[in-house]
Image (cartoon, rainbow, N blue to C red):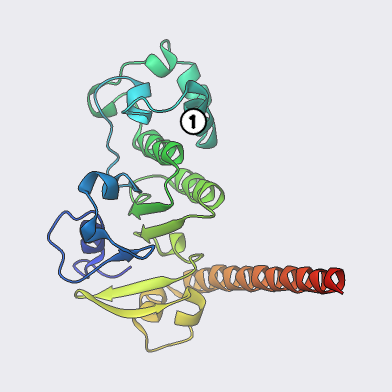
């Protein structure tokens, strides 16, 4: 997150190597500059601010390279609550798309992009202001689906609305191309002189309190999960020790 011109979208350009990178970006111990462009870009899924749909059918929009069976496509549509809508179309998955998908709303087109990401099932998902132009209901659906379907993935979110990043594990605050803060949003809100605190503060006290509560609930949930994991590890260790003896 950060103000206009802070360098948020430049991160995406660097990840996809849309420009020549200075320095290194390491993913799973691999410098992405050493990868072929196809291998690199096919490993990421992105949901852009302006949803991109292709000429052709619904099927080719969800699965451009015809790699997946029908039931995978239908399952993805069901996840984003579009299955009934597509089933009611005369051609179903073979329905011809109007130019740029003009026969669908902006929210529906964004949900199709989300379905496409679900089908690809990549371990890195990038949201580039993905909910900036949709209604609050579609925003909530997208956020809930991402939390459930991409729970084990790395999700990089560039956000227009602060509430969409308040339950993130970490927030990177950018300012004029520099990283100025990086921590859990609840911890960042403890620093009244910080960039993040001031941006949230400008939303007004009622919204500030709501956002802080979201961050607080999220960090408590993370700590609870860590305690559970530690407890299970300790129990497994005790069991192993007893079995060994």
| Residue sitting at x 33%, y 24% | 60
Q: Residue at x 25, y 28 (%)?
A: 54
Q: Residue 32 location, x and y as percent?
A: 26, 59
Farthest front residue in view: 245
Image quarter in which the C terminus is found: bottom right
Res. 12 in view: yes
Q: In front: 57, or 227? A: 227
Relative horizontal placement of residue 97, taking residue 216 as reference (left or right) = left
Among the 4 quarters of the image, the one containing residue 18? bottom left
Q: How many marks?
A: 1
Find residue 140 and report its horizontal and vertical position in percent: 50, 49
Compared with 5, 15 (above or below) is: above
Q: Which quadrant holds the N terminus?
A: bottom left
Q: Say whether residue 116 is left or right of residue 149.
A: left
Q: Position of residue 70 (x, y in %)?
A: 48, 22
Nearer the observer, 145 or 153: 153
Q: Is residue 203 visible?
A: no
Q: Residue at x 22, y 70 (%)?
A: 6
Which residue, given by chain and number where applicable, does mark 1 sit on?
77
Q: Residue at x 54, y 71 (%)?
A: 215
| Residue 177, placed above or below residue 58 | below
Which SS class for mark 1?
helix
């Amino acid at each position: 997150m950060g103000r206009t011109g802070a360098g948020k979208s430049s991160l995406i350009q660097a990840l996809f190597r849309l420009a020549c990178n200075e320095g290194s970006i390491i993913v799973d111990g691999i410098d992405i500059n050493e990868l072929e462009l196809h291998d690199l870009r096919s490993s990421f899924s992105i949901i852009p601010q302006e949803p991109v749909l292709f000429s052709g059918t619904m099927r080719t929009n969800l699965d451009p390279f015809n790699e997946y069976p029908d039931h995978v496509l239908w399952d993805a549509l069901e996840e984003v609550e579009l299955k009934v809508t597509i089933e009611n179309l005369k051609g179903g998955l073979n329905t011809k798309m109007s130019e740029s998908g003009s026969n669908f709303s902006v929210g529906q087109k964004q949900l199709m992009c989300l379905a496409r990401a679900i089908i690809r099932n990549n371990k890195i998902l990038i949201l580039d202001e993905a909910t900036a132009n949709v209604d609050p209901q579609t925003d909530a659906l997208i956020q809930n689906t991402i939390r459930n379907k991409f729970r084990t993935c790395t999700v990089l979110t560039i956000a227009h609305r602060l509430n969409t990043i308040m339950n993130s594990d970490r927030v990177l605050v950018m300012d004029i191309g520099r990283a100025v803060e990086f921590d859990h949003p609840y911890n960042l809100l403890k620093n009244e002189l910080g960039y993040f605190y001031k941006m949230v503060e400008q939303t007004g006290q009622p919204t500030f309190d709501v956002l802080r509560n979201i961050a607080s609930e999220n960090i408590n949930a993370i700590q609870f999960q860590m305690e559970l994991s530690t407890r299970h590890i300790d129990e497994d260790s005790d069991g192993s020790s007893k079995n060994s003896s």
